[in-house]
Image (spheres, rainbow, N blue to C red):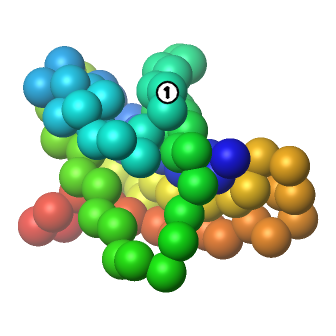
Amino acid sequence: MVIIEVSLLSGFIMTSRSRMLLENRTIVKKIEVKANVVYIYLEKLNDESQTFILQLEQVIQVKNLKPASIKIYDYYQPGGLQISYYSREGS
């Protein structure tokens, strides 16, 4: 099982539409939202390229917004962790 762990930008939440679209993907086994982190559990990955889009909604205005992380790792072997960062579009 592969986990995509998306830390949300400060002041943002994932939209319900975004969650629904992710849950309809056959590769997605489960989605959990805890505090400001979204966990997307995938059955497995193969050599095919996959794109996941999370729509976020700003609920609180935050100054000096810092980038947030996206971590991808195997649930059973978390040592192969891959980390990327993203920021708000246009900032």
Percent coordinates x, y for residue 11 in the rendering: 31, 30
The residue located at (74%, 56%) in the rendering is: 74
Work out whether 8 lies above or below 2. Answer: above
Percent coordinates x, y for residue 22 in the rendering: 28, 37
The residue located at (12%, 26%) in the rendering is: 17
Q: Quadrant of the C terminus?
A: bottom left
Q: Residues within 10 Å of mark 1 (few under 14, many from 20)?
A: few
71 vs 75, nearest the viewer: 75
- Asked if residue 58 shows in the view, the reply is no
User: Hey, what amino acid is under mark 1?
Assistant: Lys
Q: Is residue 45 left or right of residue 63?
A: right
Look at the numbered disc 1 and give the secondary structure of its residue.
strand
Q: Is residue 44 left or right of residue 91?
A: right
Percent coordinates x, y for residue 58 in the rendering: 18, 31
The residue located at (11%, 67%) in the rendering is: 90
- Asked if residue 16 shows in the view, the reply is yes
- State which quadrant residue 59 falls in: top left
The residue located at (70%, 58%) in the rendering is: 73
- State which quadrant residue 61 falls in: top left
29 vs 39, nearest the viewer: 29
Q: Is residue 44 left or right of residue 40?
A: right
Which residue is denoted by mark 1 in the rendering?
30
Work out whether 57 lies above or below 78. Answer: above
Q: How many marks?
A: 1
